[in-house]
Every structure is written in structure tokens, then in C-alpha cells.
Image (cartoon, rainbow, N blue to C red):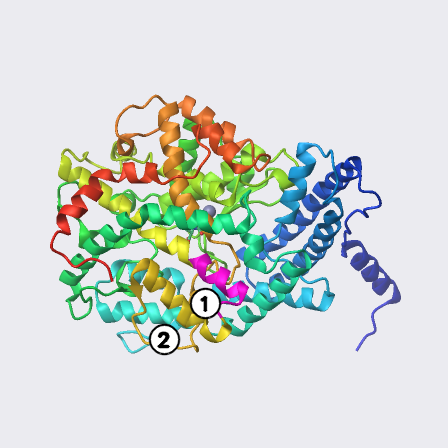
Amino acid sequence: MMRPLPLASAALAALLCATAFAVTPPVVTGTSAEDAKKFTRQVNEDLKELWTRSSTAEWIKATYITDDSEKLAAWANEALMAYLTEAITASQKFKATKGMDADTQRFLYLLSIATTLPAPSDPKKREELAATAAKLEGIYGKGEYCSKGKDGKERCRDLLELSRVLAESRDYDELLDAWQGWHQIARPMRPLYERLVTLANEGAREIGYDNLGELWRNGYDMPPEEFEKETDRLWEQVKPLYRDLHCYVRAQLQKQYGKDKVPDGKPIPAHLLGNMWAQEWNNIWPLVEPYPGAASLDVTSEIKKQNWDYKKMVSTGENFFVSLGMPKLPKTFWERSMFVQPQDHEAVCHASAWDVTYSGDLRIKMCIQATEEDLVTIHHELGHIYYYINYYTKPVLYQSGANDGFHEAIGDALTLSITPAYLKQLGLLKELPKDQKGLINVQMKDALEKVAFLPFGKLIDQWRWDVFSGKIKPSEYNRAWWELRETYQGVSAPLPRSEKDFDPGAKYHIPANVPYARYFLARILQFQFHRALCRAAGFKGPLYECSIFGNKKAGAKLKAMLALGASKPWPEALYAISGERQMDATALLDYFQPLQAWLKEQNKGRQCGW
Ligand code: X8Z
Ligand code: ZN
């Protein structure tokens, strides 16, 4: 074997030195208000660099999963995590500092919640945490279920294919097979997840939290215990509507699958609701359509018939934002995004939106299919993108939503303006629903997506908060998961489960460690935003008829809120758009008032609940 030339190895060493990048936080020598200001200014600069490095590596990993890309992402994350733990610890020296300006105080608070995965300062443990996190997401992204097809040949299916079965098949056993096949992929995650919890809890304790859940709940401008109560309050507001919907849907499923499979007074088997996690039920619309034919709402067929490609779908979303007075998406967005599933390598298909450099390098990552569901998800992702567009010139700690629920709610709020009239304008509906029956059909379709989601949105972090606090032990992970799913959603495991299974891991946000309470808040906030924007537009009719498409006044209101980023506590951002300071589900309840009245009528004499 040839030895490398001395010159070559010297050059290699130089290259390694040049790329090995470690930033350490500014050293806190004094604790005056001026020192605090200087500290946060430097932290903003450092974090922009570190976040850019880590999201560049994360982007490559997510769009091209290999052992190498996982490693690169883990390394970049390690540097970031090391910095954050140190910087947050250092910032605590300013706890007693008086006379700080409002921005400095806000930066210090935002720094204290700037990580969802805090690492212990021990480098070995940090390395292990970063590698574990990367592996977990990798297992999810590469997940597939191999089984014998009808022709006797073995074939392997990924989440997209299995989800299609869940959405389209009405065959109980075929559904069951796809459901359990996908859930199998999560089994190997269990030891890794357990380790992630231990290490991240240790990291959380080092920066002053009891456990990781307390850190997550601290991100809402109120004490963590108050936030938990706040989510309970919002859930109580919407629970009756959910239970009315559940009761009606269960009765319709009994017609399809029989009472032996879907018994009275019991939770619904999780594989019958059209979605791998039973989180949104829109795919079973044909089974629950209140007045068949009263309003034809099959947008997916029309999208397919007209051969809409990803470009057309994304441009349609962009066009909505532009109609409100927002700019067009930059050329680089079109060049750098991942819009379709790559055929020659693995990628994470779960949709996401990025500003890779925190300065307008905007991209989405999706495996777009020609369906109405994906058209809605595109609007959701563009909501994130237009938030970025409106705040990316700010210091990096301000480059977030007012709270994370706000970020998730923007695109969704606009989808509430995708009314039948707007769909007709797009050429995706032939005729408008004419009467009360048509209205109920439209509302049912909306509720299957929006209302069905609410308990799911709530329970995911209920589970994780209890896991992080130790209330749920590793030996109870799966049992506790299904208890919550039964209690909140009224949905049950369709097969016997055991602690060999790790069903929470079959949902992206668990292995990817993305907090989920944000989506629960977003389902509620989006109606509140919609009501506010409709008022700004001068709309006077019922909320479900309002579309803000093309309305510049509504656009200006929205922009004013987006441009704040995280610079103010969220109640102020909410005030800027709506004149209200509390999160509140009355807008959602008003929106669905006709449907709820109808459901109550339909459910008379039925044994509701579970
Ligand atoms: O994860 C997402 C987005 C990306 S932030 C596609 N959502 C949640 C989910 O898919 O579970 C949007 C709705 C809820
Ligand atoms: Zn999102």
C-alpha cells in the first residue's frame, strides 16, 4: 500500500482544521445591563452561524438519508448543542441584573427556550445524544414494510404507499395489514428513544429545568404549569364538538364494517379512519357524507383529472399569499426545494419548510402527490415560508413565531378561505353547494380534517410530558400511549399491543423530537386568525362563508403580526391581528355551529361516547 505523500497529509490536516468549527459563547465577566446587551448581541451572531451550519447539514440529511449525511448532521448539531448549553448556563448570571432594555430581556428569555433537545455538557453524552437523535429520524425516514402481495411476490412499501392504503381501501383486513406493517418499523426505536429521554432530561436539568417537558412548556410567555392548564381549558372548549363528530362517524363506520368490528359505546379501531394515526379523517369522507350528491366536493379527482403537477400546486398556494400583498417566492425557492419523492435515494417525506441560512434561503421539502390533502399541506408549509419572509432580517433569536402554535397556524388560517367559491375559481369545483344540505356536506368535510385532529394534537405531548417527567416509565410507554389515545380520541389499537411495540415512534414527531402542542394550539388559533382577518376585510356574513383571498387589508393585518416574529410576547402579537389577548376556541365553535346543530339532531337516540 502506498503511503500518503507528506504534502497531501499536511494539506488534509489543514483542511480538517479549517472545517472543524467550534464557537464558544462570550465569557460573562460583568453582569451590568450593558454586559447583558453585549452578551445577547454576540449570542445572536453566533447562533445565526451555528444554526445555519446545522440546518445545512440537516437539510442534506433529510433530503438524502445515508450514514454519512446522518453523521454530518449529528456533528453540526453537537457543536450547536454544546454552545447552547454553555450559553444558557452563562446567561443565568444575568438573573439579578436590573435595568436591562426590553430587547435584551426578551433575548435572554428566548435563549433559555432556544433548544428542544438540550445536551449534557459531558462531550461523550452530547455526542451520543446527537447520534441517537439522528438515528431515530433515520429509522423513520427509511421505514418500510415488506410482505407478500396478492400475487405471492414479496414487495416493500414505504409510508406513502401504506398511507394510500389507509386512505383508499375499505377492506378491514387490508387496512389492518397496512396499519400494523407501518407500526412495526418503530419497534427498534424504543431503546434509542429511552436513551434520548435520559440524556435530554440530563441536559434540561443542567440548564435549570426539572425535565425536558418543563423546558418545552416554558415557551409560552407564562409559567409552564399555567400553560398546561391553558391547553386543558382549550380542550374543554372543543371537546363537546369532537364527541358529537365521533358519535356520528362511528355510526357511519358501523354501516360499513358492522357492529361486531365497530361496537357501540367503544372506541373506534384506529385503522378505519383513513389515516395512519387517525389524526385527520378526511379520507373517509365518502363513508360519512351527510347528503350524498348534495354538493360534489371531490377536489382530488379534479386535481388528478386536470393533471396538476407540483409546480401548479405550489404556485396556487403562492398565489394566495401574493393576492394578500405578499411578495412572490424567490427563484432560489424553486431551485432548491425538494418537491417530489426522490426515486434513487431515501429522503424524509414528512413535509417541512426551511430558511436554511436564516436570511431568506427558503425551501420546502415534500413528496407532493396530486391530492387535495397535499394542496392543503402546501398552504400550511407556505405559511411557515411567509413567516420567514417577514422576519428574516431580524436578529436570529427573534426569527420564530410569536409562539410555535402561531407558526403552525398561518397557512392553515388561509386554507379556511379555500371556500367552494374559491375552489370554483380555481377550476377545481364545477358547481357550488346551493342549500343547507350542501353546507352541511362542506362543513362535515372541514370537520373531518380540523375537528377530528384536536384530541390527537393534545395527547401527543401529554404522553411526552409524562414520559419526560418519569410519570410514564419506559416499561409503560406503549400502554400509556393507548390509554391516552382511548381517553382523548376515542380510538383503540386494532390489534393486541405489548411493550415490544413502540407505537408512538410510528408518528414522525416522536423520533424527530418535534414538540406537538403547537399543532393543537394552531387548530384553534387558525380560526381566531381567520375571524380577525375576515373582520379586517370588512366581511359581515357567517365565518364559514368568508374568504380573504385577494384582500389587501387582511393581508396588511397578517403581515403586521408576522413581522413581529418572536420580538413580543405572543398575547401582543395576537392583539396586533385580532384585538384579543387570549387564545380562544369560540371562533372554531362559531365556524362549525351549523354542523354541530346538525350532528346533535343526527345523534339523537344514539349511545355516544366510549
Ligand atoms: O407536521 C406537520 C406539518 C409540518 S410542520 C406537515 N403537521 C402535523 C402532522 O402532520 O402531524 C401539520 C398538521 C399536523
Ligand atoms: Zn408546520
Write the residue at 13% across / 41% down. Answer: 294
**Is 527 on the left-hand or right-hand side of 360?**
left
Q: What segment is highlighted magenta in the picture?
A: 460-472
Write the residue at 35% across / 71% down. Answer: 180
> SS of the residue at dot 1?
loop
Characterize the magenta stretch by its predominant secondary structure.
helix
Question: Magenta stretch: residue 455 in it?
Answer: no
How far apart, in angstroms, are the residues tagged by discs 1 and 2? 20 Å
Q: Kindly tell me whether residue 274 is visible in this rendering.
A: yes
Write the residue at 79% across / 35% down. Answer: 34
Classify mark 2: residues with Cα within 10 Å, few (<14), some (14-19) or many (20+): few
Name the residue nearer the viewer: 254 or 218: 218
Classify mark 1: residues with Cα within 10 Å, few (<14), some (14-19) or many (20+): many
Mark 2, residue position: 497
As shown in the figure, which amino acid type bears the numbered disc 1?
Answer: Gly
As shown in the figure, which amino acid type bears the numbered disc 2?
Answer: Arg
| Foreground tag (1 vs 2) | 2
Name the residue nearer the viewer: 217 or 510: 217
Measured as percent of width and height from the top left, residue 594 is found at 20, 38
Please state, as top left, top right, bottom left or bottom right, where the C terminus lies in the image: bottom left
Measured as percent of width and height from the top left, residue 355 is found at 57, 43
Seen in the picture, residue 445 relative to 195 is either above or below; the reply is above
Mark 1 / mark 2, whichever is N-terminal? 1
